[in-house]
Amino acid sequence: MSNIDKYNDIINLPHHVSKKHPKMSLQARAAQFAPFAALTRI
């Protein structure tokens, strides 16, 4: 059994969109993950 076969039952399901939580803006998402950028620089 290949890895893809394990997920055949969910592979074509529609993407879930929350009715409770609004989509995070790109700017807000970038700000949330910005602190991790300092860990990747040499």
Image: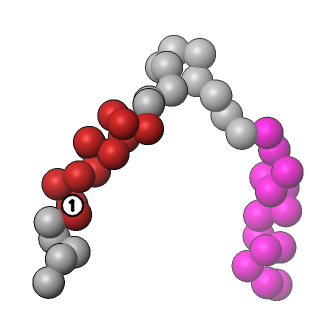
Indicate left or right for 11 with 17 as reference: right
For the point 71% across and 39% down, the residue is: 15
Frontmost residue, 25 versus 2? 25
Q: Residue 29's spot in the image, x, y percent?
A: 36, 40
Residue 31, picture quadrant = top left
For the point 79% across and 74% down, the residue is: 4
Residue 25, picture quadrant = top left
Instruction: Read off the magenta span.
Output: 1-14
Q: Residue 5's spot in the image, x, y percent?
A: 83, 73
Frontmost residue, 5 versus 29? 29
Q: Main secondary structure of the magenta part?
A: loop
Q: Residue 12's spot in the image, x, y percent?
A: 85, 51
Frontmost residue, 22 versus 41? 41
Residue 40: in magenta span: no
Q: How is the image coloured?
A: secondary structure
For the point 16% across and 71% down, the residue is: 39
For the point 77% across and 64% down, the residue is: 7
Residue type for callout 1: Phe
- The vertical placement of 40 against 38, above or below, is below
Indicate left or right for 41 with 7 as reference: left
Indicate left or right for 30 with 10 as reference: left
Q: Which residue is mark 1?
A: 36
Which quadrant is the C terminus positioned in? bottom left
| Neighbours of disc 1 within 10 Å: few (<14), some (14-19), many (20+) | few
* Element class at badge 1: helix
Frontmost residue, 6 versus 15? 15
Residue 13: in magenta span: yes
